[in-house]
Image (cartoon, rainbow, N blue to C red):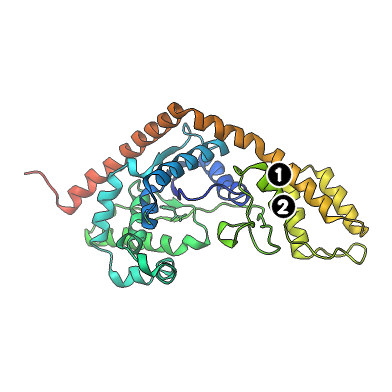
Amino acid sequence: MEKVVSGIRPTGKLHLGNYFGAVKNFLKMQDTAECFFFIADYHSLTTHPTPENLHGNVKQVLAEYLAAGLDPEKSTLYIQSDVPEVIELYLLLNMNAYLGELERVTSFKDKVRKQPNNVNAGLLTYPTLMAADVIIHKAAKVPVGKDQEQNLEMMRTFARRFNRMYKVDYFPIPSAYNFGEALVKIPGLDGSGKMGKSEGEGNAIYLCEDEKTMRKKIMRAVTDGGPTEMNQEKPEAIQNLFTLLSVVSTPDTVEHFDALYNKCEIRYGDLKKQLAEDTIKFTAPFREKVADLHANTEYLSKVAAIGAEKARESASQTIKEIREIIGFRKF
Ligand code: TRP
């Protein structure tokens, strides 16, 4: 089976866009590949979280991904900092990573612009840590979004460079995991584009947020003055609400509002109220599962421990072999 590795940033909670996007893909992958999913807590230190926030975020993310259906029996689900072998490979890769190429990475340049007071070496070497995350398991595939394509290119560079330098064919060169059919793009509430946390407050609906906040955000979603002609095409903001409705409501409900729109009799307030109630209903079982998981620390530790053991088994084999290749040998 193909080996796949993916990191999950322990920042922020899952929103509907993640749930119908990355998470859905993860669920598909765990049935068809040998998956390593980890919470990238080392990476998150580049932003200097407090110990309490770091710990809380890792726990929340673990609970949410388990609630969403990641299965620790099917996949290796672990916390990055439980696998110190990654750090050894990170150090080794850094010896052959050059300042020029690291400085040219777009996400690094963005950070330099956005946080000039915290341009730390961890940010600069973020791509080598990512490469270590993946090639430590000799993985062939990485599921990457558009924003991570350059990081994938760097992983390929570092893997190739190692092979060339030591004249070995040791690391497979990772490539993008191909998901086959495209998923529904979940739009945000601001009238344009997709749901995302960086698109501003109020744009994303988080599965774990309280019902009052959900209602408030949805009732404030961008709309327009309403249709003026029968069977008129829907402008983006309105189509977005219908798309959201189609993922949380029944087909009958969508049909109902669609018919009202086509007759120019729609009242957006009613549509939003329905969308809010159906979103709450749709996400309620998820929140219950997350709450149960939070209350079951014993289970969470067990999941983390089993994941760490499986990940370290795979990682330590790689480290043993590359130490030999590099020349760290016993007398
Ligand atoms: N950088 C990724 C993100 O921001 C998270 C990540 C860390 C990752 N290591 C990885 C993703 C390795 C894929 C493979 O979302």
Residue at 71% across / 63% down in the picture? 191
Residue 157 in the figure: left or right of residue 91: right
The reply to whether dot 2 and dot 1 touch (C-beta < 8 Å) is yes
Q: Which residue is mark 2?
A: 218
Q: Which one is closest to the eye, mark 2 or mark 1?
A: 2
Residue closest to the eye, 212 or 83? 212
Q: Split into 4 quadrants, where in the image is the C terminus?
A: top left
154 lies above or below 330? below
User: Can I make out residue 42 in this image?
Assistant: yes
Q: Counting other residues with Cα less than 10 Å from the Cα at mark 2, is it few (<14), some (14-19), or many (20 or more)?
A: many
x%, y% of residue 23? 56, 45
Residue at 92% across / 60% down in the picture? 264
Q: Which residue is mark 1?
A: 279
Q: Secondary structure at mark 2?
A: helix
Residue closest to the eye, 217 or 321? 217
Q: The disc labelled 1 sits on which kind of residue?
A: Thr
User: Can I make out residue 36 in this image?
Assistant: no
79 lies above or below 163? above
x%, y% of residue 271? 81, 51
Q: Split into 4 quadrants, where in the image is the N terminus?
A: top left
Residue at 47% across / 50% down in the picture? 11
Residue at 75% across / 49% down in the picture? 245
Residue closest to the eye, 282 or 316? 282
Q: The disc labelled 2 sits on which kind of residue?
A: Ile
x%, y% of residue 295? 50, 29
x%, y% of residue 14? 56, 47
Q: Earlier in the sequence, mark 2 or mark 1?
A: 2
Q: Secondary structure at mark 1?
A: helix
Q: Counting other residues with Cα less than 10 Å from the Cα at mark 1, is it few (<14), some (14-19), or many (20 or more)?
A: many
Indicate which disc residue 240 carries.
none
Separation of marks 2 and 1 at Cα, in angstroms: 9 Å
Looking at the image, which residue sits at the far left? 331
